[in-house]
Amino acid sequence: QVQLVESGGSSLQTGGSLRLSCAASGYTYSTYLMGWFRQAPGKEREGVAARNTVGGGTYYADSVKGRFTISQDNAKNTLYLQMNSLKPEDTAMYYCAAGGISYPLNALGYNTWGQGTQVTVSS
C-alpha cells in the first residue's frame, strides 16, 4: 500500500527557514508528478511546488518563487521542500501528494496524499 509521510513542520518566526520531508513507501517514482500543497484554515488547498519525477522539471506558485525549492532523493524515496524567508502568510498545513499527471499545481490531479505537517510562522 502506498503511503506518504510528511515531517519537518514547526513553529518559527518570520524570515526563518525550514525543510519539509515526504517519505514514500510502497511507491516508486513511476508517476509523472509529485508535489507540495498547503491549506490554511478557511482557505482552499493550494499548490506550492511540484516536480516531474522523470524529467526533473519543477513548478512553483508565484507566492513562493525564489523562496522555496522542491527536490527529491531517489535513493531515499523522499521528496523535500526547502522553505526560506518564511512569512506569516506561509502558515498552513503542508501536504505531500503523488500521482499527478498534468496541471502540476492543481490538487485535483493527484490521487495519493500524506497526512500533512503543520508550519506556523509568527511575526
Image (cartoon, grey):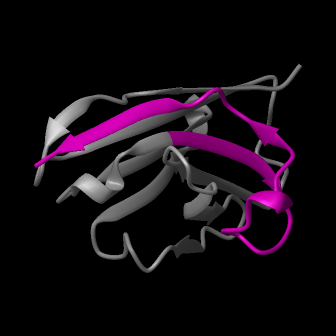
Quadrant housing residue 55:
bottom right
Tell me if residue 114 is in the magenta stretch. Answer: yes
Depicted 48 relative to depicted 55: above or below = above
Give me the residue at 34% from left, 54% from top: 90
Tell me if residue 115 is in the magenta stretch. Answer: yes
Depicted 7 relative to depicted 69: above or below = above
* Left or right: residue 57 compared with residue 107: left
* Left or right: residue 28 compared with residue 61: right
- Seen as rendered, the residue at the extreme top is 1
Image quarter of the N terminus = top right
Extent of the magenta region:
94-123
Give me the residue at 37% from left, 69% from top: 64
Q: Nearer the viewer, residue 33 or 120?
A: 120
Percent x, y for residue 48?
A: 51, 62
Quadrant housing residue 96:
top right
- Seen as rendered, the residue at the extreme bottom is 62
Percent x, y for residue 10?
A: 29, 28
- Seen as rendered, the residue at the extreme front is 42
Number of callouts in the render? 0
Percent x, y for residue 36?
A: 57, 51
* Left or right: residue 87 compared with residue 116: left
Give me the residue at 60% from left, 74% from top: 57
Percent x, y for residue 81?
A: 42, 49
